[in-house]
Image (cartoon, grey):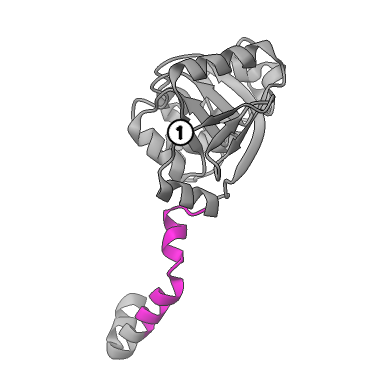
Amino acid sequence: MDKFTVHKGLAAPMDRENVDTDAIIPKQFLKSIRKTGFGPNLFDEWRYLDPGYPGQDPASRKPNPDFVLNQPRYQGASILLARRNFGCGSSREHAPWALEQYGFRSIIAPSFADIFFNNCFKNGVLPIVLPEPVVSQLFDEVYAFPGYQLTVDLERQKVVKPQGEEIAFEVQPFRKYCLINGFDDIGLTLRHKDKIQAFEKERLASKPWLAHTLAG
């Protein structure tokens, strides 16, 4: 998982409440057994005019020109502004996979669905909760100023506007530690790799028959 310390990026507005995980990554794409390749199908039913299915060549699709992420001014956006209850619906982890693989590093909203919120942290995406009036002001500024960029400083827990104004946000210390160091659940476990290997070596020395059991 990529580390997250300070990220500066173009902001894009997803001006809808209650965006669910089936909208973020539709169910037909959950058939994949890989953890990669979901970025082209992010918001698939809104992003394209033709039906989507796994294995399509994105270049052959018909983009919806009215969808926000297809508009030229938001190309390359890496910070998503959203409305209330973003990520509701089913608990599919594919949703933050798709957002991260599209290029989003942070999502700012007044509220998130709990499971989606937790899954974001486990996959290198920083969800930031800010008061609704503050988020609405950010929407107004994004619409008013093409090329509007924000800086997300996780170490200082600040969102910094282009003119330098800072907005503080809360994040649990353990989640902050994991993101700053790039630790997902596997990475957290591998911090103790030497101890795990020493334990296994000692166990096999005292119970050598386990080697045959494990090999078989």
Front residue of 52 and 12: 12
**What main secondary structure does the magenta stretch of the protein show?**
helix
**Above or below: residue 198 compared with residue 154:** below
Q: Is residue 2 left or right of residue 21?
A: right
Q: Position of residue 41 (x, y in %)?
A: 55, 29
Q: How dense is the environment of label 1, judged by Cα within 10 Å: few (below 14), some, or many (20 and up)?
A: many
Mark 1 residue type:
Ala
Task: Name the residue located 72 percent from the left edge and 21 percent from the top edge.
Answer: 147
Residue 26 visible from this viewpoint: yes
Magenta residue check for 208: no
Q: Position of residue 189 (x, y in %)?
A: 41, 63
Name the residue beneath numbered marker 1. Answer: 95
Q: Position of residue 161 (x, y in %)?
A: 64, 26
Image quadrant holding the C terminus, namely bottom left
Task: Name the residue located 62 percent from the left edge and 20 percent from the top edge.
Answer: 69
- Find the magenta span and give its range: 182-201
Q: Secondary structure at mark 1?
A: helix
Residue 91 visible from this viewpoint: no
Q: How many marks?
A: 1
Magenta residue check for 193: yes
Q: Position of residue 191 (x, y in %)?
A: 46, 66
Task: Name the residue located 39 percent from the left edge and 18 percent from the top edge.
Answer: 18
